[in-house]
Amino acid sequence: MRSGSGARVRAGAGLRRALPADDADELTWLRFRQEDVISLAQASRHLSRKAIRHRVESGRWRQVHRAVFVTHSGPVDLEQFRWIAVLAAGPHAVLGGLSVAQAGGLRGFRTRDRPVAAGVGTP
């Protein structure tokens, strides 16, 4: 499906997110797959340290962990918190338990209030 701007749109869980253009670079697709959250190692494969630092200093990106970035300046949502946790934990980390069940679509249960990561904000 395409929106009025020509960007393809993915619909899911009532949310709409624009798909990257067919000719988008690898970094754009990586950001899309990981909900706009990337590790320093991933970013470094596509950008110089200076380019990464510029994006953070200019406010285009936020550093939410010593080696993890959110590649926008808006609020961080639950899916992004999950990516932050996995990327911060290292290359062999995965979601588990209730987190993976929620990510897979489990609904109809109450969750406890969760703490907010320092400096990240609320989803």
Image (cartoon, helix red, strand yellow):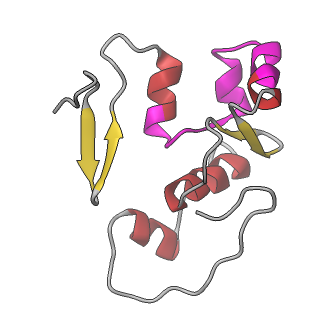
Residue 83 placement (x, y as % from top left): 57, 50
**Left or right side of 90 for 65:** right
Pick the front one: 73 or 36: 73
Q: Quadrant of residue 29?
A: top left
Pick the front one: 64 or 87: 64
Which image quarter holds the N terminus? top left
Residue 10 in magenta stretch: no
Q: Quadrant of residue 23?
A: top left
User: Measuring 70% from the left and 39% from the top, which residue is drawn there?
Assistant: 69
Instruction: Please count the marks in the image.
Output: 0
User: Measuring 25% from the left and 21% from the top, which residue is drawn there?
Assistant: 6
Position of residue 82 relative to residue 29, above or below, is below
Q: Which residues are magenta?
A: 32-54
Residue 45 in magenta stretch: yes
Position of residue 68 relative to residue 48, above or below, is below
In the orientation shown, which residue stands out farthest toward the front? 4
Q: Quadrant of residue 109?
A: bottom left
Which image quarter holds the C terminus? bottom right
Residue 77 placement (x, y as % from top left): 54, 58
User: Measuring 33% from the left and 78% from the top, which residue is drawn there?
Assistant: 107
Residue 18 placement (x, y as % from top left): 34, 34
Residue 97 placement (x, y as % from top left): 50, 74
